């Protein structure tokens, strides 16, 4: 009997794992932190008699959200003291969790949306995500946050106003996006700086996470792929891309956080992940992640190799 109860408990949890991981990632922007939250939820679930719960999924959602809120408050204080920009972990689309409301703006995992969410307080972020992305009612959110439904409604309203007012308009034509990204990656592979710049908007910017990443020529000192420590102009970033050596550098288009992106690898190891924000007149923002802790586990297949006959700068 006990073994059957254990199996049933495990099955109930595993059926909700994707939802819990999705909530945690959207709250924290970190895959490793999200996995830790889900693991902590599992430990608490394992100690609970789930047969006494009227709605196990609601219980799991509440516990996960509360753990994520506590963790987010700590991470926000930590990120505020860092001298470089913070960027979410890149999440390849084949592994990305989906919000239950695919039409919701907050089902969008793009870097732009995740960075907008970062401006919210932990309670605002949780209330907005639960209501908009996971279709939770205000009464359920109130129970999760230990607040009244009226207060939760106010939290959601304020958070929506802040996020929607700052959100850039994105182009919806996937064919245009695909062509822009493919042309940009082709220009990187050929170290064609003018071609790269033509595909960017006039005020395009690059936001990097300050991670250490170097791609250099064989037999030469390695050259950083732009200085990723600070936000910079696209021209500076393109200079770094155009100066890459051709030795064993691989470029792969990738669907990162539900949007267009790419990975760049050196000798088979991913050293840079790029996520593109695209507008009507070109690529407007490039999010560049080089922190190896965030790139751990990303694999490169079906790559575009740089031309071996391209001379290095």
Image: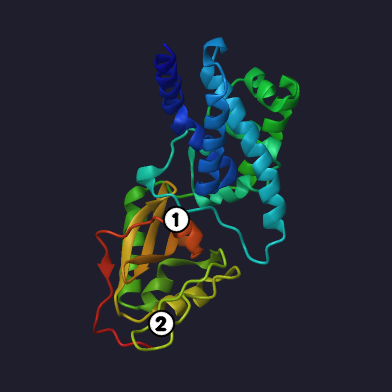
- Left or right: 79 in relation to 34: right
For marks 2 and 1, the one nearer the N-term is 2
**Residue 131 in view (yes/no):** no
Query: Which picture quadrant has residue 97?
Result: top left
Rendered location of residue 253, percent (x, y): 33, 59
Query: Which picture quadrant has residue 308?
Result: bottom left
Nearer to me, 278 or 190? 190
Q: Residue at x 43, y 73 (%)?
A: 197
For residue 177, which numbered disc appears in the image? none
Q: Residue at x 72, y 60 (%)?
A: 81
Position of 292 relative to 195 (above/below): above
The quadrant of the picture occupied by the C terminus is: bottom left
Contact? badges 2 and 1 (CB < 8 Å): no
Rendered location of residue 177, percent (x, y): 37, 54
**Residue 235 in view (yes/no):** yes
Rate crowding at label 2 as few (under 14), some (14 to 19) or many (20 or more) other CA atoms within 10 Å: many
Residue bearing mark 2 = 243
Position of 81 relative to 196 (above/below): above
Position of 2 relative to 298 (above/below): above
What's the CA distance linking mark 2 and mark 1?
A: 28 Å
Rendered location of residue 105, percent (x, y): 52, 38
Rendered location of residue 271, percent (x, y): 42, 67
Mark 2 or mark 1, which is nearer to you? Answer: 2
Considering the numbered disc 1 on the image, is that residue within a helix, a strand or a loop? loop
- Left or right: 295 in relation to 127: left
Considering the numbered disc 2 on the image, is that residue within a helix, a strand or a loop? loop
Rate crowding at label 1 as few (under 14), some (14 to 19) or many (20 or more) other CA atoms within 10 Å: some
Residue bearing mark 1 = 280
Q: Residue at x 31, y 67 (%)?
A: 268
Which residue is at the far front?
Answer: 2
- Left or right: 208 in relation to 81: left
Nearer to me, 308 or 260? 308
């Amino acid at each position: 009997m006990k073994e059957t109860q254990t199996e049933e408990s495990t099955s109930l949890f595993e059926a909700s794992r994707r939802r819990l991981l999705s909530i945690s990632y959207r709250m924290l922007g970190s895959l490793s932190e999200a996995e830790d939250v889900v693991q902590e939820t599992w430990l608490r679930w394992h100690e609970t008699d789930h047969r006494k719960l009227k709605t196990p999924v609601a219980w799991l959602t509440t516990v996960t959200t509360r753990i994520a809120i506590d963790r987010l408050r700590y991470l926000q204080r930590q990120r505020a003291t860092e001298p470089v920009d913070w960027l979410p972990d890149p999440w390849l689309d084949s592994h990305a969790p989906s919000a239950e409301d695919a039409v919701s703006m907050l089902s969008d995992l793009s870097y732009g949306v995740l960075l907008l969410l970062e401006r919210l307080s932990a309670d605002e972020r949780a209330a907005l995500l639960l209501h908009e992305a996971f279709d939770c009612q205000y009464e359920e959110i109130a129970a999760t946050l230990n607040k009244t439904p009226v207060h939760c409604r106010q939290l959601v309203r304020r958070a929506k106003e802040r996020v929607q007012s700052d959100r850039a308009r994105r182009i919806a034509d996937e064919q245009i996006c695909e062509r822009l990204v493919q042309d940009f990656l082709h220009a990187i592979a050929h170290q064609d700086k003018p071609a790269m710049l033509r595909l960017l908007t006039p005020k395009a910017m690059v936001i990097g996470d300050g991670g250490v990443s170097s791609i250099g020529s064989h037999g030469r000192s390695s050259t950083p792929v732009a200085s990723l420590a600070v936000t910079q102009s696209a021209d500076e970033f393109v200079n770094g891309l155009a100066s890459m050596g051709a030795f064993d550098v691989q470029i792969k288009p990738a669907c990162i956080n539900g949007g267009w992106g790419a990975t760049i690898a050196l000798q088979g190891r991913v050293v840079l992940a790029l996520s593109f924000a695209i507008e009507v007149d070109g690529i407007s923002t490039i999010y560049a992640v080089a922190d190896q802790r965030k790139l751990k586990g990303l694999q490169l297949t079906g790559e575009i190799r740089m031309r071996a006959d391209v001379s290095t700068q």
